[in-house]
């Protein structure tokens, strides 16, 4: 009979494969319109063809080539919850043709897709993404068609293995697969070893290694078919209720692929461990003995990487939990700002058109700033301002006077910094105020020296030193930044975290609409979510009056965006907890496996030493010594990584190049997680060893 642990592994693998397939396909559905063969990205236009001209040409192309072509456009008011698909269904038998009547079959529920005929797209700028549903050769022909219309386009295959691999290489789903694969291999190996006596009996009956292996596989095949059918039936019921079995083929192929890879790993582990049991002679195998060195080595080959993996996952889990808690703290602040919204700019533009965007959108934002219609809350990392100046970790907020009017910031006397009085002066005649917390006052001169470069990169002479007024703020303040800071990429912060509440920031207050901020600065801050409008109707009015439909493609309420990020963070935390639980299970199983191999090999010696008066630690000093070395390895792991990172930074210094980040340090989080994992892995081994020790002593006394 097979050990029940192997059967559990197969059932768990099939269930996990269905879960991964669900999450994977749902993510794809949110990022792309499914069912396409290629995506044609139109990046540039010579403006010789209008949006309606391109729509008519694409409609004719779809009919001529018997394919369907669709243009994806985010909803202006709800870009994260609704997208529009303008479809030319040239092929009545294509996967997309029924969508005009039946609607798009969304796999998930978080993003809704509305399908319209392509001729309803109007005079929208033709640059953007076009999905091709049909033969791959049609995408080449569509690029040629666009070229004749004066458009520059390129072909992409986002659903191909080549383009999906780099996108998902560092995703949590890949980490989950690795952890589950490690657990499946561990449990399979342990189950085979625990069944050593049964295999000894079969060998005594004259069964060879292939005979026993094929016997196991035949029994597993029957159970695997039942388990797979049960999981498939459950998945059909769940998907039928969830999305009406949308994209069932893609889901099934993904689940089958994941399950197939895991089953291959399980079969390899099964065969390897079975071969290991054959290294013990039949009589010893009948007693359940195992080749101790090989079995222990196999266990530690899994145990060591599992321990390091568990440490990394535990760190990510704690950071994810902290991120969720910080987002919960800022939820009330997002609720208070109501309909305040940011803008999303068009990313499908050529370099020349991007410069036009910076000019036209930047000028509109400057005029809106002068009229008091928007809030500027740009971000910079202090350590990125002046490399080598020894600035501490913290944030610089580049804000306007309206920001000070909305968000209180106090001086050391408890008085609020007020926006500049309306005295009739030109914004360019007023000073830029640099407000530095008292705790950073000694760094104020270094920060002030960087202000011209911060506001006008490449044109530092535009701002003179006497135009920067340095003031001091009270310590211990928190300021709402109107966004989470996730879109601000810095060398000093390489982890995902919510920074909606900024602790003790340095404020650089720029007069509303002044020339201190360039057009490029306005658009850069807008790209990062650092330009927001308390009244979204001002955005719509500006788009309409300034004819900015080509450049401003969406209005994003900051509260809605924060809610979506909160949802993603909670999902990420759940997956991290799942991975951590599996990794800890692997640690416990491998620890117990080591104790099983050791106790079966040395049962007689353990009993003799016990009745001779040996203490527990002395009796088991060999296995405890190895576990002690393993604990020391984990304790030394973080200091080694910190030393290695700092050595790399010193190489920059030796070459006279500013280091890309500050030296790494060992944190209290590192110490706490290290101590916790050491206690867990050592405690599991000690407990298992105590149980087996007691059993050996009891059985020995009974036989005596």
Image (cartoon, rainbow, N blue to C red):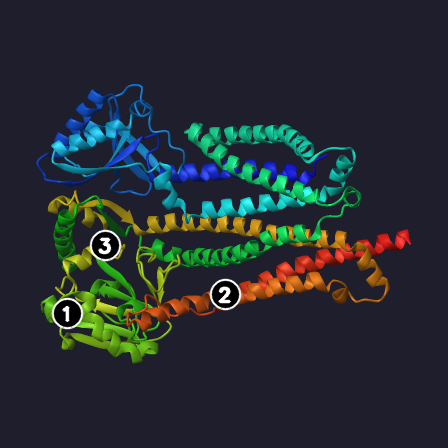
Q: Which residue is mark 2?
A: 638
Q: Nearer the viewer, mark 3 or mark 1?
A: 1
Q: Position of residue 29 (x, y in %)?
A: 37, 36
Badge 2 element: helix
Asked whether 658 or 452 is in front, the reply is: 658
- Position of 383 compared to 319: left or right? left
Q: Quick one: label 2 or label 3, which is nearer the N terminus?
A: 3
Asked whether the residues under the numbered discs 3 and 1 touch, taking CB atoms below 8 Å apart as contact, a structural biologist would say: no
**Residue 520 sits in quarter:** bottom left
Q: Quick one: label 3 or label 1, which is nearer the N terminus?
A: 1
Q: Position of residue 634 (x, y in %)?
A: 56, 63
- Position of 571 compared to 35: left or right? right
Q: Position of residue 255 (x, y in %)?
A: 49, 34
Q: Nearer the viewer, mark 2 or mark 1?
A: 2
Report how far apart the C-alphas of labels 2 and 3 lie in the structure. Answer: 39 Å
Q: Residue at x 12, y 64 (%)?
A: 515
Q: Which residue is mark 1?
A: 460
Q: Quick one: label 2 or label 1, which is nearer the N terminus?
A: 1
Residue 258 appears in the rendering: yes
Q: Which residue is mark 3?
A: 526
In the displayed image of the protein, which residue is found farthest to the right? 704
Asked whether the residues under the numbered discs 2 and 3 touch, taking CB atoms below 8 Å apart as contact, a structural biologist would say: no
Classify 623 as above or below 279: below
């Amino acid at each position: 009979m097979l050990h029940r642990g192997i059967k559990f592994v197969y059932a768990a693998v099939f269930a996990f494969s269905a879960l991964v397939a669900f999450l994977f396909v749902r993510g794809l559905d949110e990022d792309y319109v499914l069912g396409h063969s290629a995506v044609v990205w139109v990046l540039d236009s010579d403006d010789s063809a209008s949006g309606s001209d391109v729509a008519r040409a694409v409609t004719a192309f779809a009919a001529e080539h018997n394919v369907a072509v669709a243009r994806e456009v985010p909803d202006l008011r709800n870009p994260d919850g609704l997208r529009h698909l303008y479809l030319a269904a040239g092929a009545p038998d294509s996967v997309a043709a029924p969508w005009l009547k039946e609607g798009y079959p969304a796999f998930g529920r978080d993003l809704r897709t509305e399908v319209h005929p392509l001729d309803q797209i109007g005079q929208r700028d033709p640059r953007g993404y076009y999905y091709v549903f049909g033969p791959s050769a049609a995408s080449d022909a569509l690029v040629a068609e666009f070229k004749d219309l004066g458009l520059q386009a390129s072909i992409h295959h986002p659903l191909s293995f080549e383009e999906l691999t780099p996108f998902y290489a560092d995703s949590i789903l890949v980490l989950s697969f690795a952890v589950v694969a490690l657990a499946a291999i561990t449990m399979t190996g342990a189950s085979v070893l625990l069944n050593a006596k049964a295999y000894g009996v079969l060998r005594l009956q004259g069964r060879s290694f292939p005979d026993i292996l094929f016997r196991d596989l035949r029994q597993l095949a029957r159970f695997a078919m039942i388990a797979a059918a049960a999981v498939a039936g459950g998945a059909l019921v769940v998907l039928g209720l969830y999305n009406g079995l949308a994209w069932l083929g893609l889901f099934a192929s993904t689940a089958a692929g994941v399950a197939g890879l895991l089953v291959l790993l399980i079969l390899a582990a099964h065969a390897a461990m079975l071969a290991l049991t054959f290294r013990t002679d039949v009589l010893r195998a009948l007693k359940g003995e195992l080749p101790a060195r090989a079995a222990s080595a196999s266990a530690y080959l899994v145990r060591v990487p599992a321990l390091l993996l568990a440490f990394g996952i535990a760190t990510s889990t704690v950071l994810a939990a902290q991120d969720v808690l910080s987002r919960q703290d800022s939820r009330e602040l997002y609720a208070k700002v109501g309909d305040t919204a940011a803008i999303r700019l068009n990313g499908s533009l050529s370099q020349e058109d991007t410069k036009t965007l910076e000019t036209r959108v930047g000028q509109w934002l400057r005029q809106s700033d002068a009229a008091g219609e928007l809030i500027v809350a740009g971000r910079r990392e202090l350590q990125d301002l002046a490399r080598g100046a020894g600035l501490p970790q913290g944030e610089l907020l580049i804000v306007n006077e309206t920001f000070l009017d909305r968000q209180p910031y106090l001086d050391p006397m408890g008085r609020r910094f007020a926006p500049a009085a309306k005295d009739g002066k030109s914004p360019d005649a007023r000073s830029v105020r640099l407000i530095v917390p008292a705790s950073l006052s000694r760094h104020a001169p270094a920060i002030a020296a960087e202000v011209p470069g911060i506001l006008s990169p490449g044109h530092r002479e535009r701002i003179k030193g006497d135009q920067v007024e340095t003031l001091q703020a009270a310590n211990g303040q928190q300021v709402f930044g109107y966004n989470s800071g996730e879109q601000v990429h810095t060398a000093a912060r390489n982890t995902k975290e919510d920074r909606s509440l900024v602790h003790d920031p340095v404020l650089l207050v720029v007069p509303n609409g002044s020339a201190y901020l360039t057009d490029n600065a306005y658009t850069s801050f807008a790209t990062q979510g650092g330009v927001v409008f308390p009244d979204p109707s001002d955005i719509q009015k500006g788009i309409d009056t300034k004819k900015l439909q080509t450049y401003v493609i969406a209005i994003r309420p900051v509260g809605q965006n924060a809610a979506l990020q909160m949802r993603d963070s909670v999902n990420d935390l759940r997956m991290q907890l799942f991975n951590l639980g599996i990794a800890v299970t692997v640690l416990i199983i491998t620890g117990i496996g080591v104790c099983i191999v050791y106790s079966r090999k040395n049962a007689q010696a353990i009993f003799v030493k016990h009745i001779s008066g040996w203490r527990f630690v002395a009796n088991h000093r060999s296995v405890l010594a190895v576990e002690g070395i393993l604990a020391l390895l984990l304790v030394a792991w973080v200091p080694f990584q910190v030393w290695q990172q700092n050595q790399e930074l010193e190489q920059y210094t030796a070459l006279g190049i500013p280091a890309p980040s500050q030296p790494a340090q060992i944190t209290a989080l590192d110490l706490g997680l290290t101590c916790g994992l050491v206690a867990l892995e050592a405690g599991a081994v000690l407990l298992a060893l105590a149980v087996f020790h007691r059993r050996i002593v009891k059985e020995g006394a009974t036989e005596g």
